[in-house]
Amino acid sequence: MINKQVLNYANSNQSRFVNELAKFVRFPSVSSQPQHKDDLHRCAVWLAGHLRKIGLERVRVSSTPRHPIVYGEWRNAPGGPTVLIYGHYDVQPADPLHEWRTPPFEPTLRGDHLYGRGASDDKGQLFCHVKALEAYLRTTGRLPVNVICLFEGEEEIGSTNLLPFVERHRKDLAADTAVISDTRILGPDRPAITHALRGSLSLELVVSGPRQDLHSGSFGGAVLNPIQALCEILARLHQPNGSIAIPGMYQDVKAWGSQERAYMKSVGASDNQILRDAGVTQSWGEERFSLYERTTLRPALTINGITGGHQGPGGKGIIPARASAKISFRLSPKQHPDRVERLFRHYINCWKPAGIQIQIKKFFGSSPTILSRNHPMMRAAALAYEHGFKAKPVFLRSGGTIPVVNIFQDILKVPTVLMGFALPDDRMHAPNERFNIGIFHRGICTCVWFYDILGRMNLGSNRYPSESW
């Protein structure tokens, strides 16, 4: 049974843990913006120093062509399983800044939440594991399992340099299971394990016309405006019923049976709850599916941003030389990003207006993932949630994408457990992102129990600890 000293340590150090998380969130580690390159390096160095401080070994900051990877380990549990803990310390851009109540990189404690960019995605969730490891090492001097920590700085931009790192270090990263905390639960008393992720494809569509901006009085009505051409193309991406208009898009989309859809309805968020979480009153999309199904089982195409022409105050009579749109796909199981990209390129070229040049840039792509709900590691995670949250978790599908899950499956051949601690209203990727302090503490305790349960599992015989499931 778990050493109560470990949980007592976690309970008695809650305030310090929050203060340390605030220091972590203070780094503006925005991986997509070149001006923050030094901030990401400083954040990686701070995180590595923290791992050394709590007692991990062979801690290092490894350079990549873009942002560093933080590695640490503890391998002093002979005969015990090895757990690979993954997280990311990079964050999304904070804009629009005027919508933040407090500055995004000045972490602020208000009520039961710590506010700041990255507080929930993923610094707070990552820190649950770090503090659980500390609780063990500072009390018993050892962990119940062998541990590898792998924390990267490029998850928000597609984990481009993680694959070659994992391939080079696959022997060092060999493990019995991987655990990632970068997903959501249903509510403070409704824990959840994510077992399916949609894939992703991120593109930019650039439309060019004249060689330079033109005077709209001299050429308006005579020269096609690239912004107008872009809007016409974008308007053809969806059917009136909300489905994606690209031919062949649904060829690989799996039709799910009534049993799976019934389970999803029983455990997933309702339409009203999803609308409340989004802060809207009207849904949109394919009418034959619930909102939970639309955001997990079905593919989606989203226009993330449009740029072109005069953006400053006041008017300016021009026909701009170019316009662009950033577009992302979320892919359902069985779809592959390379095939979807080919379908998109063919479709766009079919509708390209005369006199306009088209360029399509790919940022990144990742395949969908489905994890077995019956794997022993999943059952260990379920039991850990029962102890940490005093409630049985449900299994959820996520509309998001975590590229590293496929990397671990394909390269390391290890099962991955997605133990989320984010709430639906944590405002991830949005202004006023926050992390619930009570959930932070429950997350730490859940991680403590998870490592204890794994340490008592006989992986060879597929037997579990004696507690009821």
Image: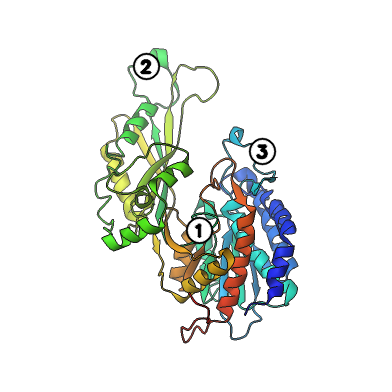
Q: Is residue 380 above or below residue 15?
A: below
Q: Residues within 10 Å of mark 2 (few under 14, many from 20)?
A: some
Task: Give left or right: position of 421 versus 77.
Answer: left
The residue positioned 61% from the left and 77% from the top of the image is 146
Task: Give left or right: position of 326 versus 144.
Answer: left
The residue pinned by badge 2 equals 220
Q: CA distance from mark 2 to mark 1?
A: 58 Å
In this picture the colour scheme is: rainbow
The residue positioned 51% from the left and 60% from the top of the image is 191
Q: 253 or 14, which is in the foreground?
A: 14
Task: Give left or right: position of 224 versus 456.
Answer: left
Q: 118 or 191, which is in the foreground?
A: 191
Q: Decide: marks 2, 1 in contact (CB < 8 A)?
A: no
Q: Is tag 3's residue or tag 2's residue first in the polypeptide sequence? A: 3
The amino acid sitting under disc 3 is Thr
The residue pinned by badge 3 equals 102
Q: Secondary structure at mark 1?
A: loop
The amino acid sitting under disc 2 is Gly
- Residue 112 image offset from top left, x and y in percent: 65, 49
Q: Secondary structure at mark 2?
A: loop
The amino acid sitting under disc 1 is Arg
User: Residue 70, can we see it?
Assistant: no
The residue pinned by badge 1 equals 190
